[in-house]
């Protein structure tokens, strides 16, 4: 009996001792893990680390939960923390942990702020001595993370990426990790799926961290940009560092349209660009596009503007041997008025709208020139009038064999605030030339053009009979040097109901004087 009691006491004492030892081991493990986590994060991210709360357990698996983790980049002063994590959860198998493997890490409320690249000193990056920590995390997952790139100029707006879900595999601080991510692009709104490799992290300058991979951009809704419509899909590849990413890809749209015209057109592009991940600025080195069957080459940049939300688009576009009906169908309400071969060159300037709006038509500015060769009007009534004009211009008003004539057109244009201002408009058919200046309301359709109708024939030769005899009295008034006639005309009204007739306003004479002064 005595032996049994003694045995029970010894057993109880042993249990208490084991419990105390276990508790001390847990305290030691807790303190060790916290010191180790802080030391590693401080070293690898060159940051001051704070952890608000840490919970640990070793049975049946090693696990740890940390709350409110913040990493302030050393020397950043009052800048916001580089990394914040609302909760970090670690899980590991004891045996695997002994050989340097953690099974999983899950991050909640992750926010990463990439600081701007400091001014170059010509001395390169000074890399400190690393703490050797041969640890591999088999999988890191994060939901609803935010990646924010901070501009070097405080007047610029930070560039944000909302990352719904990201998975990193075989992560270590000394080698790249594979990743897959899902995020939503805000404008144009659409889902992006990406897979690639990331790292290793460059603590001294995070913008120099390597990244590469491929992406698929699905169902990008261009109606999220006021003035545009259509759905785009895109895929491509990228490589480089966070502050200089080389991107190459293709886009497809079957229904791209300008809202005021409402004529969907197929649009495809192949592009090569450089993206500054720390600013969001995009530099288009080459864009080869096809609008319908018309080729268009584009280059330029899409950059931020100090103190304003949105991006400033500055492009240069050229089309050689395109189809006039493709380009006009996109920009004109209703069917394209003319077909033919078009050459086009223009600069495109689209600054961000005040207040963060995205009104494309109101903000868009164009400055360029176009040339349509062998043009043919699609409206039979207009083409009939051109045939009559050509017969009259040749002095053969009764020659019915002169029909279905083709014309050549050229003009310089400046577009701003939804109005196209055209100068040096030259429209030619056999026997006649129209030279005009004026404006066209891209949304209203209002027309106001003034200029001259120049005929190879005399005014009296444009008709027959008694009318011809009467017009002979006016031949001297409209005679042009070298023969033929020059008649002031105006085209006014609206696109749907244009009015064409003699111009007695004096604007045609003023335009003619301006053109003659500009020629020398």
Image (spheres, rainbow, N blue to C red):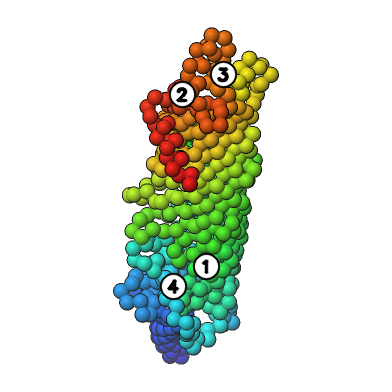
Q: Mark 1 or 2 closer to N-term?
A: 1
Relative to residue 342, is residue 183 depicted above or below?
Answer: below
Q: Residue furthest left?
A: 78
Secondary structure beneath label 4: loop
Q: Report the mark closest to the observer, 3 or 2.
A: 2
Residue 97: where, in percent of width, then height?
A: 55, 79
Q: Mark 4 or 2 closer to N-term?
A: 4
Q: CA distance from mark 4 to mark 3?
A: 73 Å
Q: CA distance from mark 3 to mark 1?
A: 66 Å
Q: Which residue is mark 4?
A: 117
Q: Are marks 3 and 1 in contact (CB under 8 Å)?
A: no
Q: Callout 1: few (<14), some (14-19), or many (20+) C-alpha neighbours within 10 Å? A: many
Q: Callout 4: few (<14), some (14-19), or many (20+) C-alpha neighbours within 10 Å? A: some
Where, by quadrant of the figure, is residue 102 drawn? bottom right
Q: CA distance from mark 1 to mark 2?
A: 67 Å
Viewer can see residue 14: yes
Where, by quadrant of the figure, is residue 196 drawn? bottom right
The numbered mark at residue 477 is 2
Secondary structure beneath label 3: helix
Relative to residue 93, is residue 363 depicted above or below?
Answer: above
Residue 219: where, in percent of width, then height?
A: 54, 46
**Which sits in the foreground, 71 or 452?**
452
Q: Callout 2: few (<14), some (14-19), or many (20+) C-alpha neighbours within 10 Å? A: few
Relative to residue 4, is residue 302 depicted above or below?
Answer: above
Q: Which residue is mark 3?
A: 462
Secondary structure beneath label 2: loop
Where, by quadrant of the figure, is residue 396 drawn? top right
Q: Which residue is mark 1?
A: 244
Residue at the image position 49 percent from the left and 39 percent from the top: 424
């Amino acid at each position: 009996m005595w032996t049994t009691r003694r045995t029970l006491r010894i057993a109880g004492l042993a249990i208490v001792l084991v419990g105390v030892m276990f508790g001390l081991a847990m305290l030691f493990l807790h303190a060790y893990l916290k010191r180790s986590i802080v030391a590693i994060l401080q070293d690898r991210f060159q940051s001051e680390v704070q952890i608000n709360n840490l919970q640990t357990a070793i049975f049946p698996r090693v696990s740890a939960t940390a709350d409110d983790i913040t990493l302030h980049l050393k020397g950043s002063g009052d800048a916001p923390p580089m990394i914040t994590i609302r909760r970090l959860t670690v899980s590991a198998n004891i045996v695997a942990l002994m050989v340097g493997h953690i099974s999983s890490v899950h991050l909640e409320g992750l926010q990463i702020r990439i600081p701007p690249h400091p001014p170059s000193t010509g001395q390169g990056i000074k890399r400190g001595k690393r703490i050797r920590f041969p640890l591999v995390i088999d999988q890191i997952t994060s939901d609803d993370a935010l990646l924010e790139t901070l501009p070097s100029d405080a007047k610029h707006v930070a560039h944000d990426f909302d990352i719904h879900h990201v998975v990193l595999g075989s992560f270590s601080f000394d080698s790249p990790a594979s990743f897959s991510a899902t995020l939503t692009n805000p404008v144009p709104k659409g889902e992006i799926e990406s897979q690639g490799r990331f790292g290793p992290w460059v603590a001294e300058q995070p913008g120099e961290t390597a990244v590469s991979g491929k992406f698929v951009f699905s169902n990008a809704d261009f109606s999220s940009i006021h003035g545009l419509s259509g759905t785009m899909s895109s895929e491509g590849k990228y490589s480089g560092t966070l502050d200089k990413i080389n991107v190459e890809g293709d886009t497809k749209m079957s229904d791209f349209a300008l809202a005021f015209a409402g004529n969907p057109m197929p649009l495809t592009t192949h592009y090569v660009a450089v993206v500054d991940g720390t600013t969001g600025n995009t530099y288009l080195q080459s864009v080869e596009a096809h609008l319908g069957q018309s080729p268009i080459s584009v280059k330029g940049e899409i950059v931020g503007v100090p103190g304003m939300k949105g991006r400033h688009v500055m492009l240069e576009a050229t089309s050689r041997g395109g189809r006039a009906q493709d380009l006009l169908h996109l920009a004109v309400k209703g069917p394209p008025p003319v077909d033919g071969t078009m050459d086009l060159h223009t600069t495109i300037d689209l600054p961000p709208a005040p207040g963060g709006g995205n009104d494309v038509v109101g903000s868009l500015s164009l400055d360029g020139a176009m040339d349509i060769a062998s043009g043919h009007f699609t409206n039979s009534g207009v083409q009939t009038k051109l045939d009559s004009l050509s017969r009259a211009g040749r002095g053969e008003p009764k020659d019915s064999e002169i029909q279905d004539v083709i014309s050549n057109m050229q003009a310089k244009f400046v577009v701003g605030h939804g109005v196209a201002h055209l100068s040096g408009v030259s429209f030619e058919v056999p026997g006649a030339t129209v030279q005009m200046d004026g404006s066209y309301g891209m949304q209203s359709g209002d027309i106001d053009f003034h200029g001259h109708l120049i005929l190879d024939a005399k005014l009296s030769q444009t008709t027959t009979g008694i009318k011809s005899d009467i017009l002979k009295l006016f031949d001297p008034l409209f005679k042009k040097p070298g023969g033929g006639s020059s008649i002031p005309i105006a085209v006014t009204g609206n696109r749907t109901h244009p009015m064409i007739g003699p111009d007695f306003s004096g604007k045609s004479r003023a335009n003619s004087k301006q053109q003659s002064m500009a020629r020398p």
